[in-house]
Amino acid sequence: MKIQDLIYFKYLVDCSSFTKTAEAFYVSQPSISLSLKRLEDEFNTKLITRDLSTKSFHLKPAGEILYKNAGTVLDLLAATKKEMENTETRTVQLGFLPTIGGFYLPNLMPSMSKFISNLQLVEEESSEVMMDLLRENKLPIAISGGDSPKIEEPWVEQYLIDERPLQVCVAPDHPLAKESLITAEMLSDYSFICLDKEYTHYTMFERWAQANQINPSQVSYTKEIQTAGSFISSGVSIGIMIDLLVKNRTDIVTIPLENAPKFYISLVVNKKAVGNPLQQEFNQTLIDIATQRTKQAS
């Protein structure tokens, strides 16, 4: 089976047009039809049903199965190619969340000096997106966070770096700003701003809100940490998040929350990724630092 045939097929289903598919890849429509025929011969089944009157088509059950898995196969092939390229080069990758990983990087930098000229930093605001990059073999190692001290994934090698409780984040002139400890009951009449579903904070906040009977109508959501900070600093909303997300902001104060859920920050290594020798040395350097940090904390 030709990989390009699978690429054509996925694009064809996505755009629902032989013409657009041919134009996108600078080939003729008969070339796309021939590609489809090769796939049908490969799997010995029909993948689509054409409606000549409307020049449209519908996926048959076999086509649905192939389309469902095509993206995964193509992503895996792309990741495999990148992994092979990395073994031929001296590129070293590290994924991190700017608002979280950036807090810990200064402690790591002295030990990373040997790798700086080869280092490629991959930044993502969302822990969920970062874990997807690791899971899909697009990254070998990252500083990420989650709502559990243990990541239950067979491909993960995890080293816990830190744990930080969620805190109440408000403007300095907010009525709650002078409190030393805040309970859920004290928050029942206020509006909240929460990060959306791409963030682990979303899951943590939703779980806490349900447990404390917070009305969903009191909650607004945003994709951007900066936007959440603006809502909080203006006094419009309260944020429930770790202090690192609003660190160094003089227009926001953080207050401990009673029985607060914890956010766990870890060095996460993808055991499936086969990096070049320099990447492997880099990984081990970070693992040694994380292990030493854990020993000191205990």
Image (tube, rainbow, N blue to C red):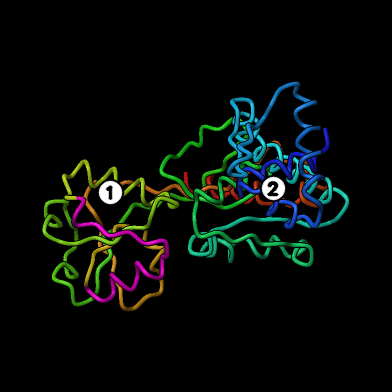
| Residue 142 location (% of width, % of height) | 61, 51
Residue at point 34%, 52% (across, down) = 165
Magenta segment range?
216-235
Residue 150 located left or right of residue 286: left
Q: Is residue 161 above or below residue 60?
A: below
Q: What secondary structure predominates along the stretch shown in magenta? A: helix
Give the mark, 1 or 2, whose residue is nearer the N terminus. Answer: 2
Residue at point 18%, 72% (across, down) = 174
| Residue 157 location (% of width, % of height) | 61, 37
* Residue neighbourhood size for the residue with mark 1, other residues' Cα within 10 Å, grouped as few (<14), some (14–19), many (≥20): some
Is 295 colored magenta in this rendering?
no
* Residue neighbourhood size for the residue with mark 2, other residues' Cα within 10 Å, grouped as few (<14), some (14–19), many (≥20): many
Residue 104 located left or right of residue 44: left
Residue 251 located left or right of residue 284: left
Q: Is residue 155 above or below residue 103?
A: above
Q: Is residue 272 above or below residue 45?
A: below
Is 233 colored magenta in this rendering?
yes
Q: Which mark is residue 76?
A: none
Q: Which residue is mark 2?
A: 18
Q: Which mark is residue 260?
A: 1
| Residue 204 location (% of width, % of height) | 34, 46
* CA distance separating discs 1 and 2: 54 Å
- Disc 2 marks which amino acid? Phe
Frontmost of labels 1 and 2 is 2
What SS does tag 2 mark?
A: helix
Residue at point 38%, 68% (across, down) = 246
